[in-house]
Image (cartoon, helix red, strand yellow):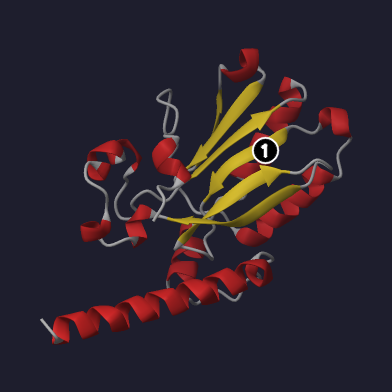
Amino acid sequence: PTAPAAASSPPSSSGVAAGGEALEGSEAGGEARRFHSLLPLHPERLHAALERHARRAADSRPTVGGIVWLASQPKLQGAVRTDEAGGVAVEPGEPWWACVPRDEWPAGLAEDIAALWHDPHGDRQSELLLRGGAASDREELALALAACACTSAEAEAWAEGDSALDDPFAAQWAPLLAATADEDRNAAIQSDVNQAFK
């Protein structure tokens, strides 16, 4: 697969958050803020936070871009982008390397993403850049994003498939997830056939 964004855009060396943390960045002359979290984000809270953000006045609405780890979607990155109208979309992205068999990794990848790897979740994490608006606007958004991090109980429920909480992103993600499941199934069948005729 194509290298996930996390592998090509490693977290800032200025700090790594155990939960959700906003780190002031030097991008755009200091007019950017980096949000980084090693905890999965709760999809319902994230959707609500982004909906509130989209309703803000344009001059107090920082743009958002990067990747997120949705608790409800452990296999794929969430690719985050801000559209021309100021809305923030969270779309299915590349697979996390943690979900790709090691024998399919490109040579040297393990070393390249070593700084991103945190057992037991591998390279899963959220890394967002908030640009524009006033510093207070970026701070407010960063705090709202930090509040989206799952509690330990919520993360465990999602991991075990026990959570009855809503995922507002599920309908949008469903077609790609179904296609990915078909590809995985076909690949497994082909692998079995190849093994049988060795």
Query: Which corner quadrant of the image does residue 120 belong to?
Result: bottom left
- x and y, in percent, of residue 90 in the image: 65, 53
- x and y, in percent, of residue 150 in the image: 54, 55
Query: Which corner quadrant of the image does residue 195 belong to?
Result: bottom left
**Left or right: 113 as drawn, with respect to 141:** left
Q: Give the SS element for disc 1.
A: strand
Few, some or many residues within 10 Å of mark 1 (<14, 14–19, 20+) = many
* Residue carrying label 1: 64
Between 3 and 28, which is closer to the camera in this rendering?
Answer: 3
**Left or right: 71 as drawn, with respect to 99:** right
**Left or right: 18 as drawn, with respect to 88:** left
- x and y, in percent, of residue 147 in the image: 62, 46
How many numbered badges does the structure rendering display?
1
What residue do we see at 86% from left, 45% from top?
55
Q: Quadrant of the C terminus?
A: bottom left
- Kindly identify the amino acid type of the residue bearing the numbered disc 1: Val
**Left or right: 158 as drawn, with respect to 107:** right
